[in-house]
Image (tube, rainbow, N blue to C red):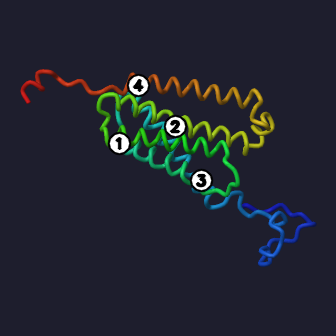
Amino acid sequence: MFAAVANPSVPAAGFNDRNRDPAQVPRRFPMTPLTYFHVLLSLVGIASGFVAVFGMVSGRQLGSWTAVFLASTAATSVTGFLFPFHEFLPSHGVGIASLIVLAFAAYALYAARLAGTWRRTFVVTAVAALYLNMFVFIVQAFQKVPALKAVAPKQSEPPFLFAQVVILVLFVGFGVAASHGFKAPVRDSRAARKG
């Protein structure tokens, strides 16, 4: 399935690969197991995040979807630090920001139980965490998808900037809609007096 393209100057892959220059060894798989796991967590976080945010927009808190979103997005950020690196990269900054935002979201939901202003804090931080996940998704798409890399090889070209501005505007809209939709339940004053 992931066969290497035959190159007569590079011997076929075999048992002696460990003694050869790694650059000369054909890659059998396009990603490492850690990368597969990291990407899977990211995609689960994005998918469950959209379900959770659209639940908030419609005024519902979808507990299981939200838990999966928070956990998988936090795990995505944490596994991002497991890749080898020699200097602090922008991706590390986004990972740290994501973990901070997720900590506030988790506290607002589980410790403060969405009481008072924590409800809005939860909405804002949950939407921000999903935005950061999508921001990285777009960056990765422009780095890895050949057609996108061709139109924005330095990620400073108009197509890349346009994609990032569009996603930012969409998420601001999601945040506003979720803030308006996900309001505290209104208590019936007659029932409160009886209790």
Q: Residue furthest bottom?
A: 15
Rendered view: 132 above or below 29: above
Q: Which mark is residue 130?
A: 2
- Residue tagged 4: 179
Disc 1, disc 2: CB below 8 Å? no
- Element carrying mark 1: helix
- Element carrying mark 3: loop
Looking at this view, is 114 or 92 the one in front?
92
Mark closer to the observer (3, 4): 3
Picture quarter with the C terminus: top left
The kind of residue tagged 2 is Leu
**N-term-proximal mark, 1 vs 3:** 1
**N-term-proximal mark, 3 vs 2:** 3
- Residue tagged 1: 63
- Element carrying mark 4: helix
Rendered view: 71 above or below 14: above
Q: Residue furthest front?
A: 87
The kind of residue tagged 4 is Ser
Specify the quadrant of the image occupied by residue 14. bottom right
